[in-house]
Image (tube, rainbow, N blue to C red):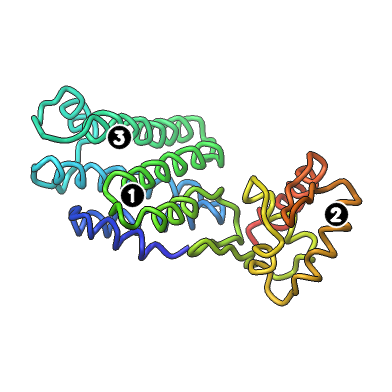
């Protein structure tokens, strides 16, 4: 997805400009690195993200941003109200605690893996990136403009989508960028990726070159095969369909080709 709208919303809220720009750039890069299996590199951007988020919060609290950020110092002082800032408990306590947990996960996992000569794995990095996603979504909820609440909800939905290689999201639209899947496989992957029911109209928008009649015909066949529930124009995976979709993701979308 494009993060320009996320950035513009945060800047419109008056958050520290340079830190917001770096934060969004770090977030974009960590997701891209994770999607192609470069877990160590993604972890480095997680650390940068946390440091820039600290500077954003320091600025909100009326303090100078720092070139050399100490996560522990900031978190401990913020939680104990050492900055005496007139901010919500969410800004003062909840978010700093998540920053600390995310930074510690990234730092300690890197150290352990180095000592044991074991590569940083997908689970560690996926967890850290998801925590960064949560923090970015919460920034939008806390500081976004109230009159843009519906658009913010769409942004948060896009940000919260699972990270699957070869799938991109923008303004509520999703696209499988790997073009060699059959239409049925694309439908299964979209349903798996979304995690809930999707209308045939939306699937038609998301799968280029296919008409609604073609999409609904394939969904009907999938219903007969017990791979989807299909009612009132909306499809949802069955347990059998989830297994099939996961096999497709693992075979075609997680091989980094």
Q: Is residue 232 left or right of residue 24?
A: right
Q: Is residue 214 left or right of residue 136?
A: right
Residue at the (68%, 63%) spot, across then down: 203
Please, what secondary structure does the residue beneath circle 1 have? helix
Q: Position of residue 146 (x, y in %)?
A: 30, 52
Residue at the (68%, 74%) spot, across then down: 208
Which residue is under mark 1? 140
Question: In the picture, residue 43 is in which quadrant?
Answer: top left
Residue at the (60%, 57%) spot, across then down: 165
Please, what secondary structure does the residue beneath circle 3 have? helix
Question: In the picture, residue 115 is in which quadrant?
Answer: top left
Give above or below for 52 relative to 151.
Answer: above
Real-space Cα separation, disc 3 to disc 2, in angstroms: 44 Å
Please state which of residues 136 and 211 is positioned toward the viewer in this rendering.
211
Which residue is under mark 2? 222
Real-space Cα separation, disc 2 to disc 1, in angstroms: 38 Å
**Earlier-in-chain disc, 3 versus 2:** 3
Which residue is under mark 3? 95
Q: How many marks?
A: 3
Give above or below for 186 relative to 96.
Answer: below
Q: Position of residue 55 (x, y in %)?
A: 19, 45
Q: Which mark is in front, 1 or 3?
A: 1
Q: Residue furthest front?
A: 232
Q: Residue furthest top?
A: 80
**Earlier-in-chain disc, 2 versus 1:** 1
């Amino acid at each position: 997805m494009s993060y320009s709208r996320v950035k513009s919303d945060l800047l419109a809220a008056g958050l520290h400009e340079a830190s917001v720009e770096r934060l969004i750039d770090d977030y974009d890069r960590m997701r891209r690195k994770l999607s192609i299996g470069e877990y160590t590199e993604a972890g480095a951007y997680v650390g940068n993200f946390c440091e820039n988020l600290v500077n954003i919060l320091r600025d909100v609290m009326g303090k100078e941003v720092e070139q050399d950020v100490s996560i522990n110092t900031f978190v401990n002082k913020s939680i104990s109200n050492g900055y005496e800032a007139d901010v919500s408990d969410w800004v003062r306590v909840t978010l700093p605690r998540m920053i600390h947990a995310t930074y510690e996960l990234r730092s300690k996992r890197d150290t352990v893996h180095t000592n044991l000569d074991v590569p940083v794995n997908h689970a560690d990095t996926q967890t850290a990136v998801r925590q960064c996603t949560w923090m970015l979504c919460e920034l939008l909820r806390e500081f976004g403009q109230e009159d843009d609440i519906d658009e913010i909800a769409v942004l948060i939905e896009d940000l919260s989508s699972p990270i699957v290689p070869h799938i991109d999201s923008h303004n509520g639209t999703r696209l499988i960028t790997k073009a060699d899947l059959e239409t049925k496989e694309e439908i299964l992957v979209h349903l798996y990726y979304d995690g809930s029911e999707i209308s045939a109209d939306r699937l038609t928008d998301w799968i280029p070159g296919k008409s609604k009649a073609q999409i609904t015909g394939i969904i009907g066949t999938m219903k007969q095969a017990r791979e989807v529930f299909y009612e009132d124009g909306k499809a949802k995976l069955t347990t059998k369909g989830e297994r099939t979709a996961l096999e497709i993701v693992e075979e075609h979308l997680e091989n980094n080709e």
